[in-house]
Amino acid sequence: MMQQPAAPRLTIAIPTLNRAYCLAKAIDSALGQVSADVEVIVSNNGSRDETHELLDKYRDPRLRIFHRESTIPACQHGNFLIGLARGEFFLGLSDDDFIEPDFAARVIEAFDRSPSLSFVYTGCWIHFADVRVPAKIGPAVESGTDFVAGFLGGNRDPCWCACVTRTDDLRRIGPIPNGMLFGDMFYWTRLAFRGDVGCVAAPVSNYIVLGSGRDNLSTKASVIEWATEVRMLVEHMAADYWQATNDPEAAARLRRDLEDFVARSTADQFIWNAIRGVPRLGLLRAVAPALTFLLPGRGQAGLWLRIFGAIFGRRSVLRRTVLMAAAKKARDVLADNLTVQQSAPGVLSQRLRDE
């Protein structure tokens, strides 16, 4: 009897819809891993552009391609991909993002070194057109509660294209609920309390937030849709945090950080909607229902400056302002990351010099 091939260590799953212009880079980065122990799944969610023709050109035994006749919601598509995965570990890679050749090897090594990790995330370049901002990272291993506190405090940037989980854990948590915008945050906010969180310092993933004329899909969410779901997810995180720590002072600090996070995220979504071209009237109508998300946050002057700029500013000016802010953040974060990763000095700094 023919022996079945061993399951791959890592499944890299790429959902796509009408993005043939960037899909090849994502696929090539997944197939270009120095670790041979990967499988790549690409699921075409009913595209009507050149995606089908592009995928027909690939011939690689590690690659499985699926074509859907009609488009299903993103959350259902994510559940479909998780169901297909054969790998021990799972990476969800958006069709406009890409990873470096040593991504899989570094992440698998981190899990093998610390088998109790609930998930692993890596350093990541966050792209704003021509500006690259390094994601904020933590130490090589930290508790889930420390990771969550760092995230809500603005000191961790766990991009989904840089997060690797155990496939079985995703299945145990269950499917992404219908209508949810952020399947990624749904999973890692739950995984964070199941053990320690690992971090690979090197920036071996790339997350495209603002492209050259074609922007990240998350910017399409309306302000209120975005804010409602973000608050729901972080409230769930806060409840788990309280159960894990039972520390009133820490919970109070987390509550303040949570309110600030929701307020900042809501104000920023006004800017992303404006850059995407949402009419001023639509943004104005979002102000009143957004108050419940904005008013608890600190730094109200800065929040309202962003919102007024989004509503009344020119799209080209807003875009330039975002790029200028990204360039400043890039300089600040480099210094912070090097300080945080003192447990492995030289790893990130050497990688940045190589870049």
Image: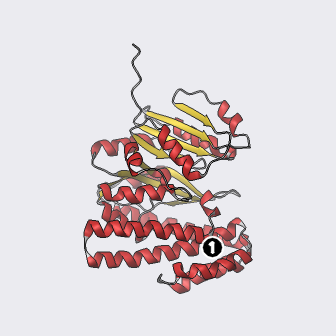
Residue 187 position within the rendered picture, expressed as x and y whole percent measured from the top left: 43, 55
Q: How is the image coloured?
A: secondary structure
Q: Please report the residue visible at 65 percent of the width from the left and 82 percent of the height from the top.
A: 308
Q: Can see residue 93? A: no
Work out which residue is located at the far front of the displayed protein and give it: 178
Q: What number of labels is visible? A: 1
Tag 1's secondary structure?
helix
Q: Please report the residue visible at 38 percent of the width from the left and 77 percent of the height from the top.
A: 255
Q: Nearer the viewer, residue 258 or 106?
A: 258
Judge whether 31 appears above or below 188 on screen.
above
Q: Can see residue 147? A: yes
Q: Is residue 302 left or right of residue 248?
A: right
Classify residue 180 by image quadrant. bottom right
Q: Nearer the viewer, residue 109 or 64?
A: 64
Q: Please report the residue visible at 29 percent of the width from the left and 60 percent of the height from the top.
A: 143
Crowdedness of circle 1 by 10 Å Cα count: few (<14), some, many (20+)?
A: many
Q: Is residue 232 left or right of residue 144?
A: right
Work out which residue is located at the far left of the displayed protein and give it: 246
Q: Amino acid at mark 1?
A: Phe
Residue 249 position within the rendered picture, expressed as x and y whole percent measured from the top left: 28, 79
Classify residue 129 by image quadrant. bottom right
Residue 193 position within the rendered picture, expressed as x and y whole percent measured from the top left: 32, 59
Judge whether 296 appears above or below 14 on screen.
below
Disc 1 marks which residue? Answer: 270
